[in-house]
Image (cartoon, rainbow, N blue to C red):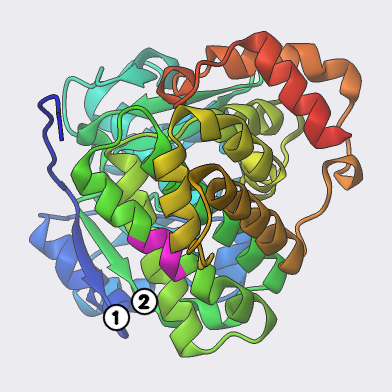
Amino acid sequence: MTLSTYSFALPTRIEFGGGAIEKTGKEAKALGATKVMLVADKGVIAAGLTKAAEESLKKEGLPFIVFDQVVPNPRDIHCEAGYQIAKEAGVDVLVAVGGGSSMDTAKAIGTLLTNGKTVQDWCGFQLLEREITPLIAIPTTAGTGSEVTPFAVITDTATHVKLNIFDPKAAAKVALIDPAVLLKLPSHIMAATGIDAMTHAVEAYTCKVATPHTDAYALYAIDLIARNLRKAVSSPDIDSCTGMMLGSTIAGIAFGYADVAAVHCMAEALGGRYDTPHGVANALFLPIVTEYNIPSDPVKHALAAKALGVNIDGKDLAEAAAAGVAALRKLCEDVGIPKMKDVEGIDPADFEALADAAEKNVSTPSNPREIAAKDYLGLFRKAYG
């Protein structure tokens, strides 16, 4: 095996298991908190998912404010608003509760608190001058892996383009992960976020910047998600929810320290224009992009198929890889992901602009097979047709 040199470090400490969220107050105090901002969307708050964190902060005598201007595909304007509120309140520790939108919004707020300027100034690869305000991340979905990733994806409201703050300095200090929070997650959200996690794992494993460390995480995540997602969607129990939460977090480590690829480039272009839920957008493109990428590395695609549960005995590499694509397509169908034509608002007249946006995505160079705007255009049309 010939390897270039690489580094691998995890800046986020993981506390996993029942009751993990009840440690919020002690963890915040250990980070030196005197004033906390709890970042969550209105739905998460209404569902009572912030209560355990709030009670824990109260128990430790830590004053806190709640910022609920969090939306799917988080916007720069809301991050700026959260920053201004946090700055005026003297916030020195952030607690994010929810899916990727809450965690990415908190990361952006933390970025502005310590680095200043605007969100756009810090979008790119390793541009931060200082670590963000200490962040405790508490996921309530099994999908984004944002609790352990070193970046935040934020939509520029002027251009409708998704931007990436991509820097280890943007990672959460602590992730408090309790799989029991998934037990009451609506099935359509479990499905979409679960396919999001699967996409992270598959792309992390097959992308150009994968390493042996990230490969190990990615393959295990593919296996966990393939074995648990259907059950977690149809009739969730603690075992399937534990498998999904582990799979999501482990996939987050895999792609957070490798990269994603063309599936995400297409999904983020779609989400930036139409506000399509990120997990659904990934699911629309995962099978066709994986199929497109097979010639780049048939061995890895065959091994991904095996991790998906495909029996590859007696199959040549091409057959095994193709069976893996079929397994991904079947998984998306089984958990109720809609067809692209059935997703509201998508206009084929926009495909050329979407292809151009996908090509400009920071992760396009990581795709295992060379891909340009004309290739993206063909894939958009294929997915829609």
Q: Is residue 128 above or below residue 98?
A: above
Which residue has dot 1 on it?
17
In the image, taking residue 202 as reference, residue 44 lies left or right, namely: right
Q: Quadrant of residue 371?
A: top right
**Secondary structure of the residue carrying numbered label 1:** loop
Q: Give the image location of residue 66, x and y in percent.
A: 44, 56
Q: Which portion, as a residue range, is magenta?
A: 220-224
Q: How many marks?
A: 2
Looking at the rendered structure, the kind of residue marked 1 is: Gly
Looking at the rendered structure, the kind of residue marked 2 is: Asp
User: Upstream in the sequence, badge 2 or badge 1?
Assistant: 1
Whether residue 94 is visible to the viewer of this picture, yes or no, is no
Residue at horizontal 69 percent and vertical 49 percent from the top: 280
User: How packed is label 2: few (under 14 Cα within 10 Å), some, or many (20 or more)?
Assistant: many
Q: Give the image location of residue 5, x and y in percent.
A: 10, 26
Which residue has dot 2 on it?
178
Q: Quadrant of residue 52?
A: bottom left
Asked if the residues shown at circle 2 and circle 1 are in contact, with their CB atoms under 8 angstroms apart, the answer is yes
**Secondary structure of the residue carrying numbered label 2:** loop
